[in-house]
Image: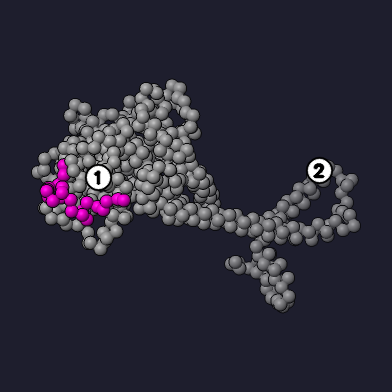
Amino acid sequence: MLNPPAADIPSEANALSTSAPTVQHFRQALLWPLRLMPPPGAQPGHHHGPWHVLRGMGDASPWREEVDEYTGDSSRFHERHYNEFVSFLPYVQRFLYGEGRSRKGGTDSDGDSPMRIFRRHDVAAVRLVSKPGDAPVTLDVIHCDLYFFFDVDVVMLNLEVGASDLSLAQAQDILYRFGRAYPSGWEADGSALHCMASVEWLGADGRVLASSDAQQREAFLSHVAQHRAPRIAAHWAYLMQPLVSDHSEDAGVLRYRQIEYYRMPVMAYLSLDDPRRLRRDDFVRLALVTGVGSGTSEAHLPYAEHHLADFEHKYCYDRFWVNAGAAPNTRYLCNGHALIVVGDARSEFFCCRDRGVLAQFRHQHFLLFLIAHFQKASLLMFSDQLVEALKRLDIRSTPSVKQFKRAIRASFERFLRFTHRYWFHEISEQAQVRALSHMCATHLGLDPLYDEVKARIADMNTYLDADSLRRQAATVVRLTVVTLFGLIGTITTGFLGMNLLAEAEAPLWRKAVWFGVVFVATTWLTIYTMVKSQRLSDFIDALSNDRLGFRGKLAALAKVWRPGAD
């Protein structure tokens, strides 16, 4: 039987100490989903292999394709990679790792692996200042990756950072302030709201590579006023180069656009000296990523008590929140946007990077988090593409209508491929992975979002089918009218097989003249009949109406030549 949450029961640790526990080891993984945009003048949907562009840039790009443990040297393949692989069901394995891949010269076919990973190694650390006057905190950059996906115009930035010996307040503040693509506003003194006061990327030699400009309020205001789109903060824009924001003035073939909220989805691993000393408000702040608490020994919830009445049920996975087992007192917190794991630093299994919870956090848990946010970003991308196709539609322009049909058909086909290749309800039979995956999907609302996008695409496709049938029916009506009126002349001239003009013995030139005259007259009459086919069709309907009098039928005939009769 599971123990109740630490805040609901008195414990010796809580009684002996009211001070917050120390975070002996901290890991944070940011995941930033972005939509890839076609360059100006390109056809939509052509970005099916953007990794080719990065490959071709050579030294002009800091990104290098990652030859991972599954495709490179087998000596790099460790037990933690095997544990990661077997955690997922076969169809998920094919998505994550491909099947039967073999690299020759570092390349493989596009269809063999649905996912491409690029990594940059020039950024070694990040220096953060939470508020003006605070001491800087330096985090090691464990890795910085870009994830591309075959046939889906989505790219995901993954940044993992780590540090040791932080206070709980520092860890909460980093989770809350770091990972914002741009400031949400500014304080009265001009400091960026909810953001770090300073962010600096550092090279291996300690040199500052780029720094944040979140305090430059006017630059962000003018950008939104001009482009109706947010301006990406300078340090994140630097990290993405040579990919550039679609609304920036920078030149670049690979362009991206924000597709989700400006706060990046976040994962965190906190190894505490005594997790049982965490209070309920500490867990609430960690799970909902609300920032630093009151700083006093008294518990103050960030929200109303009735709002958090079902907190443990909705946001906590407490299967291992017991004082027993290989990793005692381990608790998982998930709100969809964030996945946090806290545990005991005294547990060897919790801190083990090869077989323990840290290894699971960096492998199985990261991948289930990535899958959930990739699915959400893809669905939002499909929705955006439908809106853009409608915005470009001009029903008075035939080329615009044709382009609209091609765009909708392409979206429908790609959505079908996405469904069969990337859409999973179950990714694992392991209880922990499956439970955390369901929590992420539920909080992100993936199933309702999928149903909504599917219905929109189906409605659009149904409209195109109905429009095609309507156009075919109109064409059949016109051909019927032309055939009907042409039948009158055919029967008249062909009566008893007689020729109106006896020119059988005439010279060839006169036959050619008569042929030309008849050809021109017949062609003109056919074209004229097709032009008037809609009105002639109405006249035929009037003739077949028994309830319409002779005058009404004459009026219907007169409408054939009356201007503006339509």
Residue 530: x and y, percent?
67, 57
**Start-end of magenta stretch:** 1-22
Identify the image quadrant of the C terminus. Answer: bottom right
User: SS for tag 2?
Assistant: helix
Amino acid at circle 1: Asn
**Label of residue 88 in the image:** none
Of marks 1 and 2, the one in the foreground: 1
Q: Residue at x 26, y 59 (%)?
A: 308
Q: Quadrant of residue 474?
A: bottom right
Q: Residue at x 74, y 54 (%)?
A: 521
Q: Residue at x 19, y 26 (%)?
A: 205
Q: Nearer the viewer, residue 36 or 227?
A: 36
**Label of residue 323 in the image:** 1
Q: Which residue is mark 2?
A: 509
Q: Nearer the viewer, residue 528 or 65?
A: 65
Binning the other alpha carbons within 10 Å of mark 1 as few (below 14), some (14 to 19) or many (20 upward) gives few
For the residues labelled 1 and 2, say whether their Cβ atoms are less than 8 Å apart. no
Residue 208: x and y, percent?
19, 32
